[in-house]
């Protein structure tokens, strides 16, 4: 599935290379001049992510838990409602594949010291987009808002815990998101690359049944944080 995603993304990049020719010239031809005057429009996005955890401890540990993050990919749809000339309300439900691993110190066996966390998220963000004045075919913007996220790979209902090599996280989490990007008005569509940070608001960790567990006993809170790089097409 990843190979298919990256192949499709490469084809889009080749198409964009042809479309963006001349967009940054000093006197470009104005594309899609009335596009942003629409009351409602839709689109879709593809992108990449890197998820991490922010871990707070009850007592200062001898060594922190290391979080090793790998890049995942995103895909979703976009609904945009124009509120004012420079302000839009956006709903961007998406599917996010992510993988992280936690590495603990003090264990002699790898099966005890490492916990691999594979997550499949469905994210439901409600965002406000603040755009600058359009210059030629370019329009920078800021975006921010809140989201609720469903973790399809959650082990919340499992009675097993880390003593059975099962690391548990909650099914639903809440976050806030902040980012920036740029709208590029091409000949046939609008292309919007953006970078966004996501910051968890609530503790996601489900503690082990033993309160003195070496995996969860000293953790006060564990919250998601991550970076999204999205490429949106309207």
Image (cartoon, grey):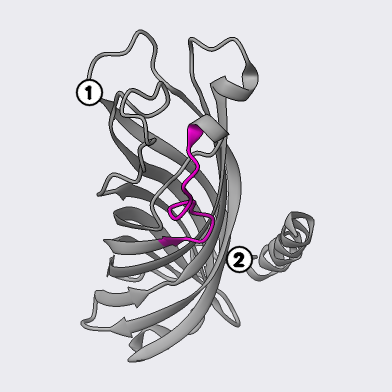
Q: Which residues are magenta?
A: 150-162
- Taking the image as shown, residue 183 lies to the left or right of residue 61, namely right
Tell me which label, 2 or 1, sits earlier in the chain. 2
- 54 up-or-down from 7: above or below: above
- Coordinates of residue 149 in the picture (x, y in percent): 39, 61
Residues under labels 2 and 1: Cα distance?
57 Å
Mark sitting on residue 58? 1
Q: Report if residue 24 is visible in the image.
A: no
Callout 1 crowding tier (Cα within 10 Å): few <14, some 14–19, many ≥20? few
> Observer-nearest residue: 28 or 56?
56
The residue where tag 2 is placed is: 22
Prevailing secondary structure of the magenta residues = loop
- 69 up-or-down from 44: above or below: above
The residue located at (48%, 9%) in the rendering is 106
The residue located at (42%, 26%) in the rendering is 215
Q: Report if residue 186 is visible in the image.
A: yes
């Amino acid at each position: 599935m990843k190979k298919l995603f990256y192949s499709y993304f490469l084809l889009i990049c080749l198409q964009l290379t042809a479309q963006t020719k001349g967009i940054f010239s000093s006197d470009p031809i104005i594309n899609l001049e009335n596009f942003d005057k629409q009351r409602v429009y839709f689109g879709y996005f593809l992108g990449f992510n890197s998820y991490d955890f922010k871990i707070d401890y009850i007592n200062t540990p001898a060594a922190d838990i290391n979080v090793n993050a790998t890049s995942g990919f995103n895909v979703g749809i976009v609904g945009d409602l124009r509120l004012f000339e420079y302000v839009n309300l956006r709903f961007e439900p998406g599917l996010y594949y992510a993988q992280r691993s936690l590495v603990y110190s003090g264990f002699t066996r790898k099966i005890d010291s490492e916990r691999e966390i594979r997550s499949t998220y469905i994210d439901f963000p409600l965002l406000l987009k603040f755009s600058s004045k359009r210059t030629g075919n370019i329009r920078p913007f800021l975006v921010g808002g809140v989201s609720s996220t469903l973790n399809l790979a959650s082990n919340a209902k499992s009675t097993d815990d880390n003593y059975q090599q099962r690391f548990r996280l909650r099914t639903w989490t809440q976050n806030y998101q902040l980012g920036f990007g740029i709208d590029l008005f091409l000949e046939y569509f609008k292309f919007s690359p953006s970078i966004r940070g996501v910051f968890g608001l609530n503790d996601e960790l489900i503690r082990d049944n033993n309160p003195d567990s070496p995996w969860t006993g000293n953790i006060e809170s564990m919250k998601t944080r991550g970076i999204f790089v999205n490429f949106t097409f309207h």
